[in-house]
Image (spheres, helix red, strand yellow):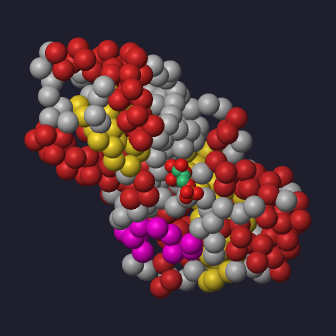
């Protein structure tokens, strides 16, 4: 039986709403099982520097609904080097840490896998607004980001309707269109443009023309940042169809704010599940929520297996327009 008395937790990569609830769940699960919990500041950077804090009951009190991450986060170049990883391992050994929970996206999971391969027990929790991780239906923060975008776009719709305008709204999502597609269905947008599907501006302007002819006075296009910028799309729409689109880039607003109840509950379930599995010797795995059930799958699935957009959601977009 693997010794697991002191468990560390870190948040890494882009922050996402619900990360604090996950940190709290890891810490409280440790306490429930009479284990110690250590928080690592600034992701893998803090791991290399031995920047650790004790996460006792009070340290994680009152954070369940707060956005961002109390542990801070960073993208670490140093951890990508063998020297950086050796140093991180040495710091954890020195602090008597027996296992690590990594909360983040696929970049963070690469780091977790490297530690696992070096023989250090490590488990991952998917936290990113992009929802681009295979092995889970939802990542922590995705639902909140969709709702944040929905709030903003409802306001844009009002002014788009009054002025009978065409709006292009750029949403995040890195190279994937999960956020854009969900936002498009939730807002009742007319079009969605995602990296997973080829886009022809010519086709889009043809469709715009026929929908204007059919009486549509305003139009909302949701654009995933992985395709092009909203400004580029604005120029292409002007060049190929003479359209005068207004653009809005939602940007980092999508990463902030207090998490929705869905994300708080998901984060709490995943935090507890990850910690309990680490305690019984599981390593090199990530937690996922598949069909409402928590499961473990190998960390490398996050980047080796492609996660596809839901065909049902794509077809909904067509049916609703
Ligand atoms: O992965 C989350 C995310 O917000 C992406 O949607 C976005 O492309 C990226 O992070 C932005 O990263 P950074 O915080 O490094 O600018």
- In magenta segment, residue 68: yes
- In magenta segment, residue 234: no
- Residue 222 image point, x, y percent: 35, 36
The image shows residue 37, relative to residue 81, as above or below, that is: below
Image quarter of residue 174: top right
User: Magenta part of the protein: which range?
Assistant: 63-72
The image shows residue 132, relative to residue 4, as above or below, that is: above
The image shows residue 132, relative to residue 216, as above or below, that is: below
Quarter of the image that includes the C terminus: top left
Task: Choose between 168 and 184: the one closer to the eye.
Answer: 168
Image quarter of residue 120: bottom right
- Residue in the picture at 35% in, 65% down: 258
- Residue 16 image point, x, y percent: 48, 59
**In the shown orientation, is residue 113 left or right of residue 249?**
right
Residue 236 visible, this angle: yes
Quarter of the image that includes the N terminus: bottom right
**In the shown orientation, is residue 310 left or right of residue 14?**
left
- Residue 315 image point, x, y percent: 35, 19
**In the shown orientation, is residue 139 left or right of residue 47?**
left
- Residue in the picture at 89% in, 65% down: 83
- Residue in the picture at 39% in, 59% down: 253
Task: Choose between 150 and 241: the one closer to the eye.
Answer: 241
Residue 116 visible, this angle: no
- Residue 290 image point, x, y percent: 49, 38
Main secondary structure type of the part rendered in magenta: loop
- Residue in the picture at 48% in, 78% down: 60
In the rendered picture of this protein, how many numbered marks are placed on residues?
0
Task: Choose between 31 and 313: the one closer to the eye.
Answer: 313
């Amino acid at each position: 039986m693997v010794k697991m008395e002191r468990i560390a937790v870190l948040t890494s990569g882009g922050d996402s709403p619900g990360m604090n609830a996950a940190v709290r769940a890891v810490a409280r699960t440790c306490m429930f099982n009479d284990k110690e919990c250590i928080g690592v500041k600034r992701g893998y950077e803090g791991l290399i520097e031995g920047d650790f804090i004790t996460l006792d009951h009070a340290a994680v009190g009152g954070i369940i609904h707060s956005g961002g991450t109390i542990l801070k986060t960073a993208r670490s170049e140093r951890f990508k080097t063998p020297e950086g990883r050796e140093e991180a391992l040495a710091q954890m050994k020195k602090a008597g840490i027996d296992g690590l929970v990594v909360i983040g996206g696929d970049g963070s999971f690469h780091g977790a896998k490297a530690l696992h391969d070096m023989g250090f027990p490590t488990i991952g929790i998917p936290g990113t607004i992009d929802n681009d991780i295979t092995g889970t239906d939802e990542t922590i923060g995705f639902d909140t980001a969709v709702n944040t975008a929905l709030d903003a776009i409802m306001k844009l719709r009002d002014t788009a309707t009054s002025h009978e305008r065409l709006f292009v709204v750029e949403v995040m999502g890195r190279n994937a269109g999960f956020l854009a597609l969900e936002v498009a269905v939730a807002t009742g947008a007319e079009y969605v443009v995602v990296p997973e599907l080829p886009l022809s501006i010519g086709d889009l302007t043809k469709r715009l023309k026929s929908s204007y002819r059919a009486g549509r006075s305003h139009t909302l296009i949701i654009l995933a940042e992985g395709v092009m910028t909203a400004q580029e799309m604005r120029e292409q729409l002007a060049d190929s169809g003479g359209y005068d689109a207004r653009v809005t880039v939602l940007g980092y607003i999508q990463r902030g704010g207090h998490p929705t109840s869905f994300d708080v509950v998901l984060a709490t379930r995943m935090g507890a599940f990850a910690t309990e599995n680490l305690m019984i010797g599981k390593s090199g795995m990530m937690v996922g929520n598949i069909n409402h059930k928590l499961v473990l799958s190998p960390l490398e699935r996050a980047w080796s297996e492609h996660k596809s957009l839901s065909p049902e959601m794509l077809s909904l977009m067509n049916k609703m327009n």
